[in-house]
Amino acid sequence: MHIVVCIKQTPDSAAKLTVDEAGNVSWGESPIIINPWDEYAVEEALLIKERFGGEPKVTVVSMGPEEALEALKHAIAMGCDEAVRIWDDGFAGSDTLATSYVLAKAIERMGDVDLVLFGKSAIDSQTGQVAVEVARRLGFAPLTYVIKIAELDPEGGAILVERLLEEGRQGVEAPLPAVVGTVKGINEPRYPSFMGIRKATRAEYPVWTAADLGVGPDKVGAAGSGVRWERIFPPPAREGAAEIIQAETVEEAARVLVDKLLAEKVI
Ligand SMILES: Cc1cc2nc3c(=O)[nH]c(=O)nc-3n(C[C@H](O)[C@H](O)[C@H](O)COP(=O)(O)OP(=O)(O)OC[C@H]3O[C@@H](n4cnc5c(N)ncnc54)[C@H](O)[C@@H]3O)c2cc1C
């Protein structure tokens, strides 16, 4: 069994995004980390590997410039077997359509993939589109918001998952190969071990380029993207003031709130 985990490098979640008047977006000097949601996908792949006696191969993949290496190293330190970075200067400026095209070409190149795991979304761009787009491009079953992989039968070529819905859980069975988008709560991601960190330092991180994947320039970057950013601007500063009602009890706080809403003729 071969499991691929797609991960993205993102700025630290504590980073502050700024947009200047010219529309230049900056995360400042924020450290680059593995997208926190993707740690759940990595952990799930490792749990499956353990469940099947260590036999499945887990390959972690990231499309990104040099900084993506840090995210890949983190995944290898957690326990993944191999890592591939996908990059070409022509990939810069790709939207999700182009990103999913490149990722799908890389997975196709691997050839023997049974399961592709993703995080819920990336904490920076956060469209939540890439997993389903990759599934669609590969013709794999798209299973999103997965909170539990209940059954996995590589021999029979089937997977049964539980999807997290607002009002409960939905069981979905699908054939393999499949794409699984994980959510927080599916597991508790492990910390990289000391041995894992040493392994990550020594590991090889091959880079697959557009030529390796047979990706033409019309499919990536601005040319391959459907999204055009007409204007990027900082949101206007919020007006008005917020007041936190202080009270001994919830009931008292509610009474104060109602009085204020009545006085303002809101209710
Ligand atoms: C340098 C740079 C320039 C950009 N320029 C543009 C632009 O000009 N126009 C535009 O529309 N967008 C641009 N983007 C944003 C880019 O389109 C998105 O970051 C990318 O397509 C992923 O979308 P998302 O972040 O919403 O991921 P989501 O769909 O929210 O992510 C879902 C999951 O997909 C996986 N995933 C996402 N991205 C990757 C990846 N690169 N490699 C492996 N797995 C991944 C992860 O598992 C993640 O949890 C740029 C991004 C970067 C880094």
Image: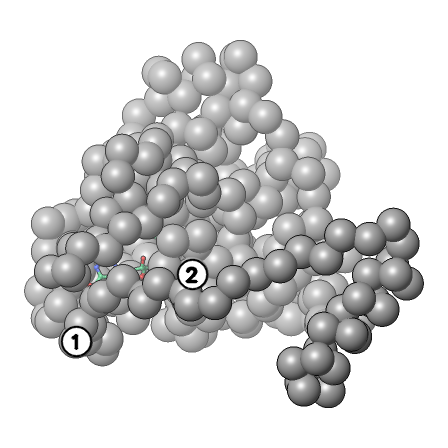
Mark 2: C-beta under 8 Å from nearest atom of ligand 1: yes
> Which quarter of the rendered image does ligand 1 occupy?
bottom left
Q: Of 71 and 4, which appears nearest the observer?
A: 71
In the depicted structure, whether residue 136 falls above or below residue 56: below
**What residue sits right under mark 2 in the picture?**
126
Would residue 208 be found to the left or right of residue 159 on screen?
left
Give the residue drawn at x 18%, y 55%. 20
Badge 1 density bin: few <14, some 14–19, many ≥20, Cα 10 Å = few
Q: Of 67 and 148, which appears nearest the observer?
A: 67
* Residue 78 visible, this orientation: yes
Would residue 86 be found to the left or right of residue 230 on screen?
right
Do labels 2 and 1 touch, CB within 8 Å?
no
- What amino acid type is highlighted by mark number 2? Gln
Give the residue drawn at x 45%, y 43%. 13
Give the residue drawn at x 22%, y 36%. 66
Q: Position of residue 171 (x, y in %)?
A: 76, 70
Q: Of 255 and 9, which appears nearest the observer?
A: 255
- What amino acid type is highlighted by mark number 1? Glu
Mark nearest the camera among 2 and 1 is: 1
Q: What colour scheme does the image use?
A: one colour
**What residue sits right under mark 1 in the picture?**
230
Q: Position of residue 109 (x, y in %)?
A: 31, 54
In the depicted structure, whether residue 150 falls above or below residue 169: above
Give the residue drawn at x 29%, y 44%. 27
Kindly identify which numbered label has been placed on residue 43: none
Q: Position of residue 94 (x, y in %)?
A: 21, 62
Q: Position of residue 69 (x, y in %)?
A: 30, 33
Quadrant assignment, res 141: bottom right
In the depicted structure, whether residue 219 falls above or below residue 148: below
